[in-house]
Amino acid sequence: MTGFFADVVWSDIALATIDTLAMVFGSLVLTVLLGLPLGLALFLTGPRQVWAHRLMHTTLSTAVNVLRSLPFIILLIVLIPVTLALVGTSLGVAGAIVPLVVGAAPFFARLVETALREVDRNTVEAVQAMGATTRDLVLRALLPEALPGIIAGGTVTAIALVSYTAMAGAVGAGGLGDLAIRYGYQRFQTDVMVVTVVLLILLVQLLQTFGDILVRHFSRR
């Protein structure tokens, strides 16, 4: 077993793991900050909602669909000029954050919209009948009722970000994906590939388990 891992430099593995965690959680925070209000806007401007506006809803929906339809590896390349303008580099953890957020925020926004649609219509109408403002409707009815679904969507998004970071390694973003490509694939070091794959699987399992715990905690069912 020791001989099988002869090519593995554990310090490089540790550094790559830290880079992957930084990319996942850094981009996840920004994704939630952008995707949550975008999902709310998609829901509130939809038919029969308080801000119903066909043109605005269609515009937002189209923009979200366009960004979601682009394969992430292509999005990485297309956004290089934007990334350079915003953070000054297209490489490393900092260079990966921008495309990760642009790729994940529309995805999360759709999941938020779906969770909000599952809120009981009677609950929404009851709150509105009491004269609640839109702010009260969102903060006291929609978000609390949809919270388990939103957390579940956040978990799915976090797991998607793990796979995105692996793809980002193809353009020099660093992390476990970069290590797997440079050593596991290009240099045929199978042991490095195995270690990176196992670590990515463990990360996904931990994210899913933690997300499930939060959903059970906040669920009112």
Image (tube, rainbow, N blue to C red):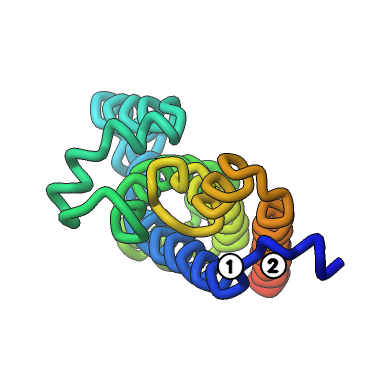
**Amino acid on which disc 2 is placed:** Leu
Please name the residue that numbered disc 2 is placed on: 206
Please state the horizontal and vertical placement of residue 149, each as a whole percent of the image: 60, 55
Out of 61 and 13, give the one closest to the viewer: 13
Of badges 1 and 2, nearer the viewer stands: 1
Specify whether 161 is left or right of 92.
right
SS for dot 1: helix
What's under tag 1, amino acid-wise? Ile
Residue in view at x 30 percent, y 52 percent? 91
**Residues at marks 1 and 2 touching, judged by CB atoms closer than 8 Å:** no
Outermost right residue: 1
How crowded is the residue under tag 1: few (<14 C-alpha within 10 Å), some, or many (20+)? some
Q: Give above or below for 43 relative to 125.
A: above
Answer with left or right where residue 163 lies relative to residue 96.
right
Q: Residue at x 44, y 25 (%)?
A: 69
Label drawn at residue 13: 1
Q: Residue at the location (50% across, 51% down)?
A: 178
Estimate the x, y position of residue 199 in percent, counting from the top left.
68, 62
Looking at the rendered structure, the secondary structure element under dot 2 is helix
Q: Image point 35% across, 38% down: which residue?
A: 76
